[in-house]
Amino acid sequence: MIRFNPTNLIRHTINPNAQIKPELSIVVPIFNQSGVINLVIQRILENTYSNFELILIDDGSSDGTKNQLISFNIDFKNVPNLVAFKVFRHKFSKFETYCENFGIINSNSKYCLGIQADMIVSHYKFDLKMINALKSIDSIAVISGRGIERLIPIIRMYKKTLGSDTAQTSNVFLHLARQIKKQFVSQRSDLPELNTDLFVEKSDSDFILTGTAGRIGKLVNLTMDNQAIQSKKIYIGETVMRGPILYDKDKYFLIGGLDVNRFFQGFDEHDFCARAMLNNYLVGYTPIGFSSPLDIGTSRKKRTILTEIIILTKILTRFNKRKKSTLSNEKKLLKFLEEKESINKILN
């Protein structure tokens, strides 16, 4: 049987001195990030404290990313806690939802941490802080290192779009035309200057009132205040933003995982959080130090015409399925949240 777009393991480097199973699996979906991916990987290696495996998924890159992942040099003497380094590749893009879910399914640890390929971690032991937050209450299923927000505004935004971060317009053909035009516009692939403007976290009372904290949306471009990074606060609320995002793998599968049938890039973490809440799990956020310049965002990277056609196909084939997603059921979720009154709280 010929597979049109197989997922191939193109590198599997094992630490010869590793005697134990990894406690943590870090999953990084990557698309055309040759300008920054070596730095992203290096910072993960430098700042991860747990015994871990690194699972990298090249999602059909066409800019040399594949060769960089194959040739990336690992000195296990400098990273003795790295148990294994795996690189998978798709010939054509399968997008973030599939990649992250695939990485979790193929992981060998209790905890799975998703990091986007445009996020440069600067926080030593960031993984330990997130794992401790996840362990703090048994009912917490997922912890974000980026932010937390209200669910209903997300649902209403989802309904106004094509259900993906890759296509925000309501006219799919207009979207394709715009992408075709972009093929003739040069796009930088090197690392831009980092924005050093500080993001100051909301006060506790503001979070309780608004349900929102962290670097939501374009605020991700700002640098997190060091005081927030050092704090042990855990914000419990309605839904969290991906990047970095930590799952308890057992709870991940009990909740049903990311819905790859109805989502392919964007909104999938919110759908997961909605299902988590309906199953009486909690979702949370604890501030992590990382930089993510908007210029190098994966969803903003230039794609080929073929990939844009694949995007449109995915949008059209999922159109009716979207109506059956948990995220589409605004009435059910609104009723659930009203009965709960407020789930916003802060743990220290």
Image: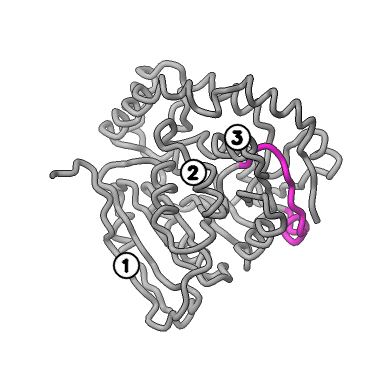
Residue in view at x 49 percent, y 50 percent: 116
Would you identify the image quadrant in which residue 92 lies? top left
Residue in view at x 66 percent, y 51 percent: 223
Say which label, 3 or 2, has the lower sequence index.
2
Q: Secondary structure at mark 1?
A: strand
Q: Quote the CA–CA distance across marks 1 and 3.
A: 35 Å
Horizontally, is 74 left or right of 342 in the view?
Answer: left
Residue 244 can be seen in this image? no
Q: Secondary structure at mark 3?
A: helix
Horizontally, is 51 left or right of 285 in the view?
Answer: left
Between 348 and 195, the residue placed more toward the observer is: 348
What residue would you read off at disc 3? 274
What residue would you read off at disc 1? 12
Say which label, 1 or 2, has the lower sequence index.
1
How many C-alpha atoms fall within 10 Å of the one at disc 1: few (<14), some, or many (≥20)? Answer: some
Q: Quote the CA–CA distance across marks 1 and 2.
A: 25 Å
Type of amino acid at the residue the image marks with label 1:
His
Q: Position of residue 220 (x, y in %)?
A: 62, 44
Q: Which residues are magenta?
A: 225-240
Residue in view at x 67 percent, y 41 percent: 148
As for residue 81 lying within the magenta part, the answer is: no
Check residue 257 in the rendering and tell me which mark sits there, or answer none: 2
Type of amino acid at the residue the image marks with label 3:
Ala
Q: Quote the CA–CA distance across marks 3 and 2.
A: 12 Å
Would you identify the image quadrant in which residue 218 lies? top right
Q: Position of residue 245 (x, y in %)?
A: 57, 50
Colouring scheme, one of rainbow, by chain, secondary structure, one colour = one colour
Between 346 and 41, the residue placed more toward the observer is: 346
Say which label, 1 or 3, has the lower sequence index.
1
Q: Secondary structure at mark 2?
A: loop
Would you identify the image quadrant in which residue 72 lies? bottom left
